[in-house]
Image (spheres, rainbow, N blue to C red):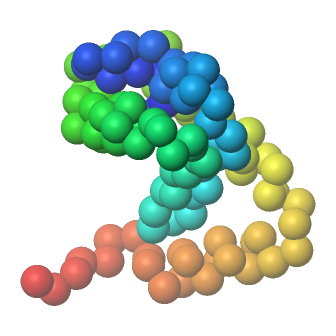
Amino acid sequence: MFNGSEHYNVDFFKPLQKIGASDLNVTTNEDRNNCFETVPVSAPDLVLSLKSDRMGHFKAAIDQAKLDEQRGVVQNELRQYANEPYTIAEELMAKALFPAGLKLVK
């Protein structure tokens, strides 16, 4: 979620762009999200503060419009990969390895 947090409830990328950050991007798979950017050496305090607030205090800033926007982003990413080779194979493999109702032992 990059649309604000409890203490900074606006687009997360705007202040980064103001300080000259580049390569702002996120990658996602089933297990993790990688959020990264290239920032000037003079700005780690701002970047770490924004990231910390975003990770620890985003709950108070979430609303339905922001959730819907993020849902749209994910749906768009799924459409981009839907026709790539092996997409169906990966989906079938995941369903076979982790069937519905699977109970994990503690």
* Residue depicted at 57% across the width and 26% down the height: 19
Residue extending farthest front: 42
Front-most of 68 and 54?
Answer: 54
Residue 105 versus residue 92 in the image, above or below:
below
Drawn side of residue 48 relative to residue 41, left or right:
left
Q: Residue 22's spot in the image, x, y percent? A: 68, 40
- For residue 68, say whether it is visible: no
* Residue depicted at 34% across the width and 17% down the height: 8
Drawn side of residue 85 relative to residue 53, left or right:
right
* Residue depicted at 54% across the width and 75% down the height: 95
Q: Residue 41's spot in the image, x, y percent? A: 51, 46
* Residue depicted at 34% across the width and 37% down the height: 45
Based on the displayed image, in which of its 4 quarters is residue 23 positioned? Answer: top right
Q: Residue 44's spot in the image, x, y percent? A: 41, 42
Where is the C terminus found, in terms of image quarters?
bottom left
Residue extending farthest left: 106
Based on the displayed image, in which of its 4 quarters is residue 90 positioned? Answer: bottom right
Drawn side of residue 91 relative to residue 82, left or right:
left
